[in-house]
Amino acid sequence: MEAMFRNFLWQQKDQNRYHWVNWDKICMPLDCGGLGIRSLSDTIFGLHGKLAWNIIQNKSMRSQWMNKKHLRGGQLTCTKLDSKLWRSLFPHIERLQEQAVWILGRGDISFWTANWNGKIIDPYTNPHIKVCDAIHDLDNLSTCLTADQLNKAKKIVLEENQDDTLVYNSSPSGNFSVKSYIHDNMITRSHPYWANLIWNRTIPARLGAFMWKIMNRAIAVDERIGRKGIHGPFKCNCCKTGNLETINHLFFLSDFAKQIWHHFGGIFGITSVAHSLPQLFHIWTKNISLRSQLGYTTLGTMMYSLWGIWKERCRARFEDIDMNIQRVIKFINSNIQDINLITYPKRQIDSWGKNELDRLNIQVKSLVVKRGSWLQWEKPPPGSYKLSTDGAIKNGIATIGGIIRDDMGDMIGAFWQKSEHTSIDATEMDAVIHGVKLCSRLGIGMYRIETDSMAVFKAVDGSSRNPALIYMARKHGLRSRGIDHIHREINGVADLLAKAARSNEDKIFELNNQLPNNVRKTIYFDKIGLKNYRKGKYNSRCVTV
């Protein structure tokens, strides 16, 4: 079947043609230099993973039957006498048991063989002991556990009204997907520098396909045809010396190509001369931004120059006419004009860039930004309080901060300190935990939590599938707390406190005059209802000036 796929890609009608690029390379992702076509072997691999996932979840009648059939000594096993299907699924089951984590509810899963800890503890110990039973007998089990495993087991908090849930670590939602499973278990491949340049929204797909072929040396120049065993009286059409036509000669070393690159290099201020495709990409793309009009115009000019030379060579070869430089320049100018009609910049260019576009008779586009919005911090209802928290990580140092305010907007308490966590989500959750502890210390009961972290909001709200955050929320009783997600523009006080912790000792504040001036000013601005501007995003249309 894959032979049919290959023939569809390379053949035309019923004519056999050479396969210029290896099929395995074609099936690589776009950013790895392939075409992003999924091979049948990868598809089968992913679907086997999906079947294995369903078996591990043990929800359907078929998966329950397979679990009971192959459960030996309390764990799933595989022998030579098992069916071919089971023998093909078992490696995926073992792999998924490491890549998936159980979010504990009632704790009805095996303490030893289920991955609730981030890693299976010991698959060879008694698998019949459940988590819900083991946490009450840790003293007797401590001899079989490392210090880290014992510490994590002591922190377990179960929820009797919740089922244990299996989540896939590599998916943000926690749900298993064939695509993410294939990607996670794919052999690590290099990412060529040119892959993301030729496949982007500013470059037409036909041009990207040509560039992919030329970067893989998959075009029929005489030298490549000779390597396929076809020999003849070859002669280069782009010069009078009769050189052998190679990719480097046709596109860089010939007199015809040199004039094309000299013409457009002069417009863009590029004086260096490329002698190969890697050099060409380095010279023309090292300082460009595809978010600017000048950037995608420069990239388009480079690519259309290659395509224009190739089209002119084919015209000369098959129509028996001389190659014409002005015709190629006109072709390139026309196409980069078209690129500028259908694409829109997201970054403004300077006067030097505008002069370059003027020399190409291209109108400079100005950015049209969506209207932003003015946001205001809202005071809590009468008789209640608000706890605003934030976390920050810079240069590997994690810090947290938070403030408690009453219904008048006045500070009741605040804190800043360093955090031991390394991920931003865990740091944000740590800020909430310390804020809740401060509320308890001050005897404050009626309050709502505010955070600008959506991950923390979902963990406390109950809609998250992140095991680490869920455990932190459960352990400190946050699941029963009211929480709101706010934009960072109105979480300025907590943000300033978290940043200040980098250069200060851990501290708790109970008086407003103890705070730094910039924090006090921001508290006052929030109190009087001063609004903060939240920027809009770039629009899908632009106007020309």
Image: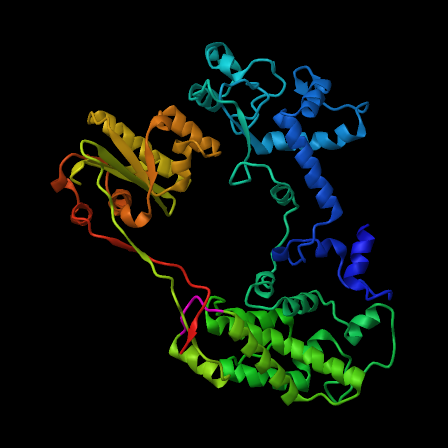
Residue 480 visible within the image: yes
Asked which quadrant contains residue 25, the reply is bottom right
Residue 422 visible within the image: no
In the depicted view, which residue is nearer to us: 358 or 59? 59
Image point (43%, 19%), residue name: 154
Residue 218 at x, y percent in the picture:
74, 67
Q: Give the extent of the magenta segment.
A: 344-349
Q: Main secondary structure of the magenta part?
A: loop
321 left or right, relative to 382:
right
Q: Is residue 273 above or below residue 162?
A: below
Asked which quadrant contains residue 5, the reply is bottom right
Is 345 magenta? The answer is yes
Q: Is residue 234 above or below residue 533?
A: below
Image point (77%, 72%), residue name: 220
In the depicted view, which residue is nearer to us: 266 or 157? 157
Q: Of all residues shown, which one is farthest toward the front?
A: 382
Asked which quadrant contains residue 374, the reply is bottom left
In the depicted view, which residue is nearer to us: 373 or 45? 373
Image point (74%, 90%), residue name: 322
